[in-house]
Amino acid sequence: MIAKVLSTIVTTILLALIVKLGWKVLNWAWLNPMKLEKSLRKQGYKGNSYKLLRGDILELATMVKEARLKPMPISHDITSHVMPFDNHIFNKYGKKSYVWFGPNPRIYVMDPELIKEILSRPDEFQRPKQEPLRDSIIGGLVVSEGQKWTKHRHIINPAFHLESIKSMFSAICSSCSDMIGTWELLTAETGVTEVDVWPYIDNLAGDVISRAAFSSCYEEAQNIFRIQKEQMELVLQLLFIIYLPGGRFIPTQANKKFHKNRKELHALARSIVDKRKKEIEMEESNYDDLLGVLLESNSKEIKEHGVGMSMEDVIEECKLFYIAGSETTSSLIVWTMVCLSLHQEWQTKAREEIMTVFGTGELHFEGLKHLKTVTMILNEVLRLYPPATNVLRTTIKETKLGEMTLPSDVNIIIPILNVHHDREIWGEDATEFKPERFSEGVANATKGKGSGSFLPFGGGPRICIGQNFAMVEAKVAVAKILQRFSFKLSPSYKHSPFAMFSLPPQFGAHLKLCNI
């Protein structure tokens, strides 16, 4: 009798648990998405009807895969090639639209005032806690929130102060000189050569971040860069499944390699941090690079307040230094060369300015602020070819945005590339290369639309901490290249901007270099 009662109780409990779990799954997979879709449509948003579990992800992945198969015509109007699915949605439903990433809706916000509002309220519009594409490649400040982000930003800030960057100036110049020396060897015999400059620029950015951040050279960091690039390629292979429930745990060959790489990358970053800590403790090293300044700042924070960053946190920031410090800057430099190849008059103007400030001699840090034309060119390249093509935020509760009331758990896409190419913001020449639009600064270039319309490094309190470092590196690279070479597109050049972590040229950048 007792056994029968116990059996009945256990059966009842199991059934209750199954029903509870089933309800949770039903709510997550169907009821909540349908509720969110109804709410968004009431707010005036349009999009495809929700498809159980997969949403729009298969259609998105198919369009991205097809776009990778061939280059586009040479033009700065790149949105349909770089973001084919987003462009398809805009054409079908207009700017006020949404897409489905699995059971999660993502709304597009392109109004500069609303963008400014979102980015200025980071506690209300946070980065999604779970974002497979982002979390698979980067961490650190990019994924931190709340008090953790505030403390980490405070600790890391000194590493990116202008004085710290100034102390790294010679390392940046040395890396650029090495690349220029290689190109001079290639042109030594005839004075001209046809070369894919992308691998050299990619290596340059890696060498700069290795020297300036970790006082090492590119060769020592090449395993980290190799793994990070491999991870980005693997993510593209996994795009069909990564947003599906449990997709990351399906034992495909790509998934297995991906998880193995994550462990190896973490181990490499840990060894770099541990080695530097020991060198500093034994007074065999100083604090004159990014990692050194970060460790010093963290040590000071712990002494003054008792709590700082853990070594795991420092390791995550180092991984972020490597990928963000190399990918974004290399993208800026290579597209600057492509744009100056297409617009020779601006190449001439930039070279004349550089020769006026530096002549043919060595660069000096103070001279960079006099490169007004170069700055205009870099800003225009950042507008047309932003390193990050979008920013993702989410609501953590029902939230007011402008005249709308957004429910909790709605992701927001700020499509930076589309905003930068928007004719309503920039005028009818929005897809043309016109650096003169920045002649009176960024504020005047946006025609009164404000900071929400120019977002190469994000915006608000969470604006990219490394933007000054990136701009200094880009100015040095462009100045040194233009001192020694003129260049134009090769007949074999294929226009192929492609969104990964940044916006690299998928088929390289084949140019004709000519000694001056």
Image (cartoon, grey):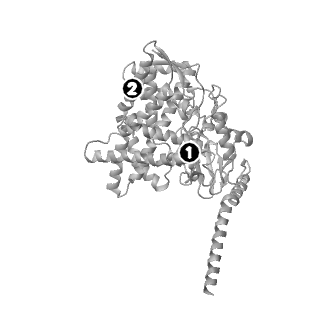
The three-letter code of the residue at mark 1 reads: Ala
Q: Quadrant of residue 381?
A: top right
Q: Quadrant of residue 209?
A: top left
SS at mark 1? helix
Q: Distance between the residues labelled 2 and 1?
A: 36 Å
Q: Position of residue 175 (x, y in %)?
A: 39, 29
Is any part of residue 376 visible from this angle? no
| Residue at 34% in and 55% down | 302
Q: Nearer the viewer, mark 2 or mark 1?
A: 1
Q: In the rendering, which numbered label is found on residue 254?
A: 1
Q: Where is residue 361 in the image (x, y as percent from the top left)?
A: 37, 20
Tag 2 near tag 1, CB within 8 Å: no
Q: How many marks?
A: 2
Sequence-wise first label, 2 or 1 = 2
Q: Position of residue 53 (x, y in %)?
A: 68, 54
Q: Nearer the viewer, residue 442 or 164?
A: 164
The three-letter code of the residue at mark 2 reads: Asp
Q: Is 276 left or right of 71, judged from the image as shown? A: left
Q: In the rendering, which numbered label is found on residue 178?
A: 2
Name the quadrant of the N terminus: bottom right
